[in-house]
Image: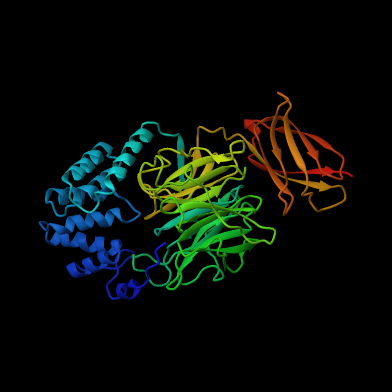
Amino acid sequence: MKPFKNYILLLTCFSLSFYGYSQKAIPEDAAEHFKFGNYIDALVVYKKLIEKDPKNIDYPYKAGLCVLFTDRDKREAVKFLEIASERKSDPDVNFFLAKAYHLNLKLDEALDSYEKYKSSGEGTRQNEVDREIEMVKNAQKLVNAPVDITFENAGDEINTEYPDYYPFITPDESFMVFTSRRKSGVREFDGYYPSAIYYSKVDSGQFDKSKKASSLINSTYDDQAVGLSYNADKLFIYFDDINNVGDIYEADIKDFKFKKKVKMGENVNSKGFESSASISADGNTLFFASDRDGGLGKKDIYMTKKLPTGEWAEPQNLGENINTPYDEDFPNLFYDGKTLYYSSKGHNSMGGFDYFKSTWNTETNSWSKPENLGYPLNTPDDDICISFLEDQASAYISAWRPDSKGDKDIYRVTFNEIDTRQTVYKSKIIPSGSTEAVTDAFVSVIDNRTQEEIGTYTPNPKNGSFVMILKPGSYNILIDAPGFAPKNQDVYVIGKSDFVPFTTIEFTVTP
């Protein structure tokens, strides 16, 4: 989300490098790229300058910073910054060397370098060092108690050599929307191409080749997918151009086709910066991230309710249990209506943004203390956007990993400690002789073995659908719909040998 575009004109004056071009070893070129945040091209030039003048004091320092400031492999940063530290090229060098150690999980070395920097009393980052030390100590605790998780690259149909990120997946894993900065148009000031929204549908268990969405939601500037509704009928978009920075738009989706994006109203967008949004499964509550006036720090998570007029009400800050003096972003309310996933640079982050989870307590009307989702899902780098499947045992994220195809890739992650043997029933209640689903009903599920109620459900008021997640066993479904006779029906969920993860079921009711 980089609003500054003026460097595009300057960029075209230089020979391009990262995606297949050459770059000469000219110090002025490197300095110009670095000044405007084009660390990709600057790094190429600085590497050549180091070969040409290996004893230069400044080149290794700038090369190390270039590696740190991109979203790719950070291992080279240690090599360059260790040289820069030995040569004492800049008062801030030990701060950034510590950062490089941190990002590469050399945590003891990171602490030593941060303490060395702090004790020097020099440099421009002294006001940040205490928080960095705190995050390294958080990382030590989390790395020593890793979660059992599996990463699976989403593959060539989704990922490219360019940045692919911000994935949003439907609950049944049939449709994905994401953002990419693959080759298109003129490269921007940071050396990347403009961001655009892509999508892919699943066919025969595999993602189709991803396609760029139409010009109804993509422009020649930066468009990014930042939220998707439960039924995949509404997409939230971050858009900026030369005149507009940091606003949220929405676009309807019908039959996997995107309608024209429309800027959201003033109770969502402000004079500040809004970066992401998501909507509850019933469509009545919106969560979004904003750095508007009156927050608790930088970007905070806000919530607003839909009014009878269809407009959004005055937003409310989610408070200190969720928000911190640091940045929060990408709120995503799970389909149960009470579990909030989001990213934060605060709390016990192990570095940059981490993924957190908080649960709404209906008795105290408050959010629980956020839980860090753990290492190696979280890393010392920025972990920003996570989208869960219905079973909460699998999700999609973006990250740079050793098997990435060049830059950030999209990954499917599986939490192995969670029992995944659950069937997701996409359900509706259909009156006898009708095709229209009942939207006003109450459904409860009883475990036939224990006779305990294990869940209650209400249909989506828009389309009458609801989702039940059941482990192998025997259940009695009780349906109470006004105007219809009470309904009892047994459902048997098959065991592992014949397990089916997703299925549909319709309950017929009679007057």
Q: Nearer the viewer, residue 412 or 348?
A: 348
Residue depicted at 32% across the width and 40% down the height = 134
Residue depicted at 39% across the width and 51% down the height = 404
Task: Identify the image quadrant of residue 6.
Answer: bottom left
Q: How many marks?
A: 0
Residue 409: image x %, image y %? 43, 52
Query: In the displayed structure, would residue 494 be above or below residue 119?
Result: above
Residue 403: image x %, image y %? 38, 48
Residue depicted at 80% across the width and 53% down the height = 436
Task: Identify the image quadrant of residue 31.
Answer: bottom left
Q: Is residue 297 left or right of residue 216?
A: left
Query: In the displayed structure, would residue 491 be above or below residue 243?
Result: above
Query: In the displayed structure, would residue 265 be above or below residue 392?
Result: below
Q: Nearer the viewer, residue 424 or 81?
A: 81
Q: Nearer the viewer, residue 441 or 214?
A: 441
Residue 150: image x %, image y %? 46, 39
Can residue 177 be seen?
no
Q: Is residue 442 left or right of residue 265?
A: right
Residue depicted at 59% across the width and 69% down the height = 260
